[in-house]
Amino acid sequence: MVHSRQLLFGLVFFILLYLPYNIHAQKSTYVPGEFIIQTNGASPHEVLVQSLSTDRRQKTSVHAIDLSSEMGLYKIAFDTVKVNEIELLSKLKTNPNVLAVQRNHYLKPRRVPNDPRYEEQWPLRSNNSVHADIEAEAAWDVTTGGKISNTHDIVIAVIDDGFHVDHPDLIENLYVNENEIPNNGIDDDQNGYIDDYRGWSFKTNNDSLSTGDHGEPVAGVIGARGNNGIGITGINWDVKILPLLLDEKFTDAGLLASYIYAYKLRKRFNESQGAQGAFVAVTNSSWGAEGYFPDEFPVWCNFYDSLSTVGILNCVATSNGNVNVDVTGDIPSLCSSESVVVVTNTDINRNLVGAYGPKNVDIAAPGEDIFTLKNDGYGFESGTSFSAPVVSGVLGLMYSVPVPGILDAVLRDPEGTAHITKNLMLQSYDYVSALDGKIKVPGIINARKAVESMMAYFNVENIDYCTIDSLTNSSYFLDSLIIGSEVIASGNNLGYRPHSFLTDSLEQGRYIPVSLVSNTYTDSLDFVLWLDQNRDSVFSDSEVLVNSRDVARWDGEFFMPERLDSGYYNIRVGVLATTDSINPCGTDIPSYEYEDYTVYVKLNPLLCQNSPAVDTIMTGPDYLQIMWEEVDSSVAYVFRYRKQGDTEWEDEMVDTSKMFTLDDLDECTPYEFQVRSVCFYDTSAYTPVAVFFTACISSNENQEFAESIKVFPNPSHGGNLTVDFRNTNLPIGQSAVSVTLYSMEGRQMKTEQRSSLLSDQLHLYWPDVPRGMYLVRIDMDGRFAVKKWMIH
């Protein structure tokens, strides 16, 4: 077997030499004045002496930073004004002591869609120079949309004038009523609409939708198909858009009819606990009546309360005029239902463009120069009509976070869960001073904060740690906490500040700057920070990330463990009178203050994440073609295999593809396989052992033996199995027999061995084997047979 050090050395050489440009770089692709080199064991000083002329060495300082001297990896830093970068790179490449050299490239997260015109979508694309986006890319690190609790499609109804339903960037995300057979003239699902296969038009009373020019760009903002290599992306890469067309005259009646359709669909979903109907989470409408008040539209406004009862949130666009709708009137902006979300629009500079109203307009969202779907192609649109779908899209994204508890809450209390979701969204904004006093929420929606708040609310169990006694008068308290870029001025809480959420997420495998500032300027105190890494509601000694004694305050950093899963974690911070018995509960400490926080820990794109899932795609009698899921941050994979039962693995192998064929294997034999991913700065653990069978095409003797063997009962009820040898023509009682049970995935479940048979039938009893299909292998006298066997 290849020694691990040799393997790692060769692997790093392979990666550095051939793969550096697999990393997605920012526009400024590399750090000026920095190289990464790998030497053959020579010191970096020796390499630089050879590569720099004497006068150049004297005139400038070139630093070598040790990345791993054991593997000969160093970062070289120098002044580009004094050293010719291209010349030095050329000399390093030809230096006999340098195995590989590359520039030090900037990296960025992978959760960016591959849609070619994504760069034109300023509200979604992260841009450090403008800071105008809604942090969609950070939200996509958690979810890109799709299903609620990974179970039911999330449906957003778009009430508008028409759609180009065959647009290639929309067609995959359009809702289809699978309970309706199209064009058969029958109301198959008995919902009152005949042939409503892909929505409904109240203009034509069928599902003919290809008309108008407003609905399609609205739908594109919410859910143009993301990461499909064409056009643009919606806020949801994956979602189901339900097209509902207004009537021919664009009247209240047509709008109400559309809302009623959505209401019936969701009501049926609720009543059947998800078995029928559809999970219509949100409706989006850009249509309204300016200059009116609710008493003139009581039916319209009241119906939002009906939609609320089934759990539908309704995003509506306020007026495009620069007016205060609280004073001038606007419907539906002034409809007071809890299910309504009223949205105004801002431009790339975060200036208010649409109407406002501190009592009735809820939140702002980007709505000017929005690049979206248009007719059969793409184009720009502006107005509150295109800010409302931003909020609709974010609400859909919130429902898709990977938390089982959300679906439970939706089915148990649809209206209450919708109100919670709306309130979480309204708390998730970027403050904009110019909006303060103009609208209810003084800011612009932030998708990352919305998604993280949804995760936090439905995923974090009640904190049930040790109880901390309140103090009538504590001499010391945590005046302020600075963690990452977040500042929390907490003040005196008499010993304990209850749990709250940190706004900013933290990244695994990073050093996090922290300042713990007490109320005193002169006293020495103990500063402690615990992180419940295994989430067992205990702050153990091994989970202390900060433990330091200092005067008045402590400034430093802690390392966020790199093997944490993404998700929410609880932190306890303590400022304690100096003690020899530091603990998270205040025991035997005369003066203290503890504060509890929950923080979202996100994945580090530079680290190798979970090992890839493995499967076979083709098998033969002497080969297995095995593939595994791609790991976003990987640059190569290491895998190994062995025949099941062997103690030694075959030599480890390296490959950049996610598929490999193992040749020269034995037929009808189980093989164990493992793979791990290799990233630039990290290597994952091996996957759990996967077992795969080669095909059973054997000699005539084996074939005759296999045909003569019978297994029964098949199917079996309860695990009884009889292997019948009567037709084998082999001498009974003279040969050893082995019977092994495998799952269809190749995992060995049971094995029975007999030194000889006492009769021509072998009776086995395996009552603890679950129901399902299995493979039974029988070995006897140098022959084998493999039979399928089912347990009911």
Image (cartoon, rainbow, N blue to C red):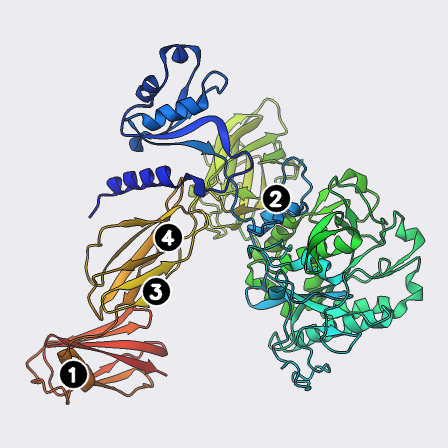
Distance from Cα at disc 4 to Cα at disc 2: 40 Å
Q: What residue is disc 3 on?
A: 616
Disc 2 residue type? Leu
Q: Where is 121 relative to 212, above or below?
A: above
Seen as rendered, the residue at the extreme bottom is: 726
User: Residue 549: x, y in percent?
Assistant: 50, 28
Where does the image place residue 210, in percent across and percent down from the top left?
72, 69
Residue drawn where x is 83% and y is 43% of the image: 437
Mark 1 and mark 3 residues within 8 Å of each other at the beta carbon: no
Three-letter code, disc 4: Ser
| Label 4 vs 1, first from the N-terminus | 4
In the picture of the structure, the residue carrying the numbered disc 1 is 704
Query: Pointer 4: what residue?
Result: 657
282 is higher (above) or lower (below) than 792? above
> Which three-letter amino acid code belongs to the residue tagged 1?
Glu
Report, in whole angstroms, how far the alpha carbon at label 3 lies from the one at label 2. 44 Å
Which mark sits nearer the N-terminus, 4 or 2?
Answer: 2
Which tag is nearer the camera, tag 4 or tag 2? 4
**Closer mark to the observer between disc 4 and disc 1:** 4
> Disc 2 designates what residue?
502
